[in-house]
Image: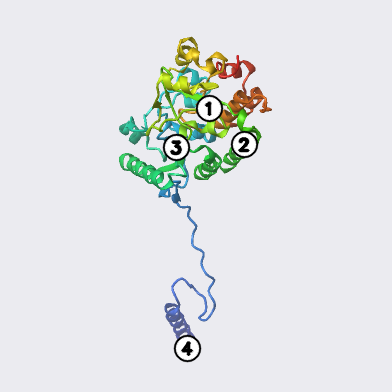
Amino acid sequence: MHKIRLKKSISKGVAVILCLWLTTLLPAGCGSRLAGTQQEPSTPAVTESATRVITDMAGRQVEIPAKINTVYCAVPTAEAMMYSLAPEKMAAWVNEPSGDVKKYLSERTKNLPVLGGWMGEKCTANLEEIAKLAPDLIIFMTDLDPVLDPVNKAAAGQTADSIMDQTKRPAIVMNSIFTSTPEVYRIMGDILGVQDRAERLAAYCEQKMAAISDMVAQIPEDKLVRVYYAEGTAGLATDPADSHHAEVLKFVRGKNVADVPAKSGQGMSPVSMEQVLAWNPDAVLVSSNSDGVKCYQNILSDASWNKVKAVKDGKVYLTPSLPFGWFDRPPNIMRILGIEWLASVLYPEYADINLNQEVKDFFSLFFNMDLRDEQVTELLNHSVKQ
C-alpha cells in the first residue's frame, strides 16, 4: 500500500517538474499555450498623438498641437478670419479694438489682451506677454502673390521662422490674397478642428465671388468706372491696380487711375494734387483707416478737390470698416462683403444686389449677429450714394 502511494507521489512530482520545464521553453507571453499553436497577433494600444506636422502656405513643415485651443494672430489681417471661424480660440488682439468695433464683438473677445504684432516693416509685439500667454498656435498672414510667389513665400517663411524663434511657439503662414479666401478657410478649419464651420464659410465666399465675377464680366469696357483710392489724412496717398491693398477694386473691374509704383511694406504710395487732377477720376474711394472721416470731409470741402469730376458728381465714398475693413486696411475676409458693396456703388445699373439684406446675411453667418436696419445704415454711412 505504501509502495503504491509512493509511486503515485513520485509520478506526480515528475509531472510537475516536467510541466515547469516545458513552460520555460515556451515563448514569453504565450502562457499555457501548447507548442505549435498559432498565436493571435497582439494589438498595440492606440494612443492619440499630441502633435502633428502640417505644411503651411509658405511650404514650411511645422509641428503643431493636434488640438488647438488658443490662437494668437501675429497680424491684424488674420483676426477677422479667426473671429468668424473660431472666436472662442482667439487669445489676443494685435491692436486695441475701438469703441465702434467693440459694438460688433462678443463679450469675451471685447476683453482680450492687446499684444501688438508683426506689421509691415515694424514689430510691436510684446514678447514677454506672448510668452506668458503661450498660445497653441501663431498665425502670420500675408499676401503670397502668385506673380512673386517664390520671393513672397521665402520672405513670409523667414518672418514666421523669426516669430517662432522669438516666441518659442509654432507659427504658420497663411495667404491673404483675396481669391485664396475659400482655400484658407478650409485649411484653417482643418487645423483648428472646425471643418464643418469652415466649409460653410468657404462655400459662401465661393458663391458670392462667382456671382460678382459673372456680373461685372457683362459690363462693356466703355462703361467701366475710373476710380481713385484716397489714403492718408489728406487723401494724397494711394495704391495702384496690382497692389494687394486694391484687390477689391480690381475684382469688380473698377479702373484704378493711379499710375504710380507700388510702395513696399504697408503700401500707400505718395501722389500730388496735380496728379489727381490730371487723372480726374469718376469716383473716389476714401480709406476709412485712421482719419478716414476727416479725410472724406476735407475732400468734399477742399477747393482743389472740388475740381475733380468725382467730387462734382457726388461720387465720393468712404470705405466701410466695421467691425473690420470691407475694402482694405487690413485686407481681410470682409472683402467678400466689400465686392458686393463696391459693385453696387460703381455699377448700380448692372448690380442686382439688395445690399441691406446681403449685409444682414453676412453678419448672421460669419459673426452670429442679427442686424437691424438702422445698424446697416450706420455701417454704410458715407459709403453709398446719398
Q: Which residue is mark 3?
A: 70
Q: Which numbered disc flags the more N-terminal residue, 1 or 2? A: 2
Q: Say what amino acid the circle numbered 1 marks.
A: Trp
Is residue 117 visible to the viewer in this orientation of the structure?
yes
Q: Secondary structure at mark 2?
A: helix
Could you tell me how far apart the alpha carbons at marks 3 and 2 are, in whole angstroms?
36 Å
Pointers 3 and 4 in contact (CB under 8 A)?
no
Q: Residue 224, position in %: x, y?
A: 59, 29
Q: Secondary structure at mark 4?
A: helix
Q: Which residue is mark 1?
A: 326
Q: Nearer the viewer, mark 3 or mark 2?
A: 2
In this orientation, which residue lies closer to the viewer: 361 or 230? 230
In this orientation, which residue lies closer to the viewer: 89 or 211? 211
Q: Residue 291, position in %: x, y?
A: 43, 17
Q: Secondary structure at mark 3?
A: loop
Q: Say what amino acid the circle numbered 2 marks.
A: Ser
The crowd level at tag 3 (other Cα within 10 Å; few <14, some 14-19, many 20+) is some
Q: Which residue is mark 4?
A: 7
Q: Say what amino acid the circle numbered 3 marks.
A: Thr
Could you tell me how far apart the alpha carbons at marks 1 and 4 are, in whole angstroms?
100 Å
Q: Which residue is mark 2?
A: 213
* Furthest residue in direction front, as rendered: 278
Q: Which numbered disc flags the more N-terminal residue, 3 or 4? A: 4
Instruction: Tell whether 173 sits left or right of 336.
Output: left
Is residue 333 visible to the viewer in this orientation of the structure?
no
Pointers 1 and 4 in contact (CB under 8 A)?
no
Q: Which numbered disc flags the more N-terminal residue, 1 or 3? A: 3
Could you tell me how far apart the alpha carbons at marks 1 and 2 are, in whole angstroms?
17 Å
Q: Which numbered disc flags the more N-terminal residue, 1 or 4? A: 4
Pointers 1 and 2 in contact (CB under 8 A)?
no
In this orientation, which residue lies closer to the viewer: 35 or 367? 367
The crowd level at tag 4 (other Cα within 10 Å; few <14, some 14-19, many 20+) is few
